Each structure stands twice: as C-alpha cells, then as structure tokens.
Amino acid sequence: MVGITVLDGGMGRELLRIGAPFRQPEWSALALTEGPEQVVQAHTNFIDAGAQVITTNSYAIVPFHIGEERFVSEARELAQISGRLARQAAGVAPHAVRVAGSLPPLFGSYRPDLFDATAAQRIIDPLVEGLAGDVDVWLGETLASVAEGRAVRDALERAGVADRPLWISYTLDDRGTLPSGEPVADAVEAALALGAEAVLFNCCQAETITEAIGVAAARAAGSAAVGGYANRFVTARVSANEQLSALRDDLDPDSYCEFVARWLDAGATVVGGCCGIGPAHIARIATSVAQR
C-alpha cells in the first residue's frame, strides 16, 4: 500500500442515526430488506466524508443476530444484497472507493470461547459466496482469536476467491491481548502467515489500539499494512451487541482524530472507525490525512 487509506465508520450506529429500520437482535441486518436505500445512504455518508474503503453491511448476517432458521434460508441472499448495496454506493462516488467484504465473528462478538472450527464452515461459506461478486477486499473483522482468522482464510480458499487481498482485523481486550489471551505479536505473525495484506485492530477502545499498532508495525516490517478503527463504547466490552451500548462523550471527531494521529505516528497506514464513529469523525480523519 502507498500512502494512508481512510476507512469508513460504524454502519449500525449510522443506520440508527439516519432513521433506518433497526432493532435487536437483527441489528444492522434488518435494513438490508426493510431499508436498503438507507444502507446505500449510510455508505454514501461515509464516502462523502472521505472514506476510500466502505465495508459491506454483512456483520450481522449470522445466526446470533438473525436466527438459525432465517440464516439457513436467507444468509447467502442477504450477503449478496449487502455487497450489491455497497457496490452501488461506491459506483457513484466522487473518488475511487473500494468495497471490503465484512466477514464477522461467526458465533458472537468477543467470544473466542464459542468458536467452533467445525461448525464455522456452514456459517461463513454462504457469506463468502454471497459477497464474492462485489468485493475488492476481504475483511475478517473483530476477530477474537487466531483460529477465527484461519477460518476466514479457509473459507476463501474453499470458494476459490483467495486471489483478492485479505485484511485481518483483531479486537483487543483491556489487557491489550486478543480476547483469547493470545498476544498481539503472535496474532500478527499468524495473520502474516495467512497471507494478510493488512493487519488491523478494531471494535475496541482507542487507547488499546495505540500500543498494538507499534507491535504490529514492528512485526510486519513493511510486509503488510497495519492500522486500526476503534469503537466509542464506554466500556471495553458489551454483550456481543445484545443491546446498544452507551457511547463515550470524550471521543468527538477532534479527540478521536488525536488517537488516529498517534496510530499514524506509530506506523499505521489504514485508519477509520467502528461502532459509534460517524461520518463527522471520518471527515476529520480525512482532512488530517490530507494535511500530512
């Protein structure tokens, strides 16, 4: 990668902000069928703010959110819709925009203890198949263990779509390790071994990401991009999106951009936001990046 890449922000909270259909447990997946035009609008809001990469609204297309029965019958179609809507927004953008296909935790966020490698295939494969027609980059995000990253790579291999760039993004707990307890350095090495072109950290507190960026940049040593996109949750962990978490008041666009500046100084080249980070935050980041 050359230069700095600006990602988008949190899709779920942006959908909620603009009045899209939204309820638990479906979360952001509800708008795919009940408000697709608002999904496009959310993408567009981030693009207009300066995002160069937008992420498909496929994070909640898992049994945990939409239920087992609906997942079995509709997962592939819903993933396909999410890819198409992102591509629609990117296709009319005033600047070049890539689409990242979100491959989320398959058994609930922040719960490496629930991960089942055998059961993972039946959940992740429909997502990959549905997204494959529209994505430029594969993004395994909010991964809580190295094993979850391996499941992403295996799925891409099975589907024959591993030729596109793979980005691995881990979440961190308040100890600065993956929720599985695996150290950042080991997780970075594992991602590089899987062929990741970017190793990122997301959906955790901004403070935690800062140190991880330095470790990742040292380990990657230029062989992969590193970066981060934090959430605005008041606490480091919520109950896997079972309910809306309160957001920090001290992470307004300017304050959040100060953290992003530290990440860039530590070697990050891919930056954006996760839950609660909106278009105003991304606009501030884009302006700061343009000034560097």
Image: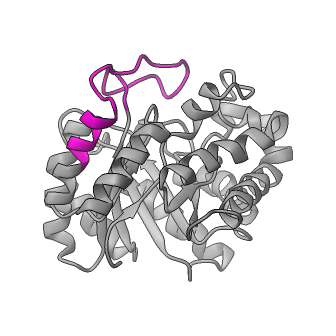
Q: Where does residue 214 sit, x and y in percent of width and height? A: 14, 58
Q: Where does residue 173 sit, x and y in percent of width and height? A: 27, 36
Q: Quadrant of residue 188?
A: bottom left
Q: Vertically, is 2 above or below 268?
A: below
Residue ID at (56%, 68%): 95
Magenta-colored segment: predominant secondary structure: loop
Q: Can residue 288 be seen in this view?
A: yes
Residue 142 horizontal side relative to residue 217, left or right: right
- Residue lying farthest bottom? 163
Residue ID at (46%, 35%): 275
Residue ID at (68%, 56%): 86
* Residue 253: in magenta span: yes
* Residue 14: in magenta span: no
Which stretch did the figure color magenta? 232-260
Q: In which quarter of the image is residue 136?
A: bottom right
Q: Vertically, is 120 above or below 160?
A: above
Q: Nearer the viewer, residue 86 or 154?
A: 86
Point out the image quarter for the C terminus.
bottom left
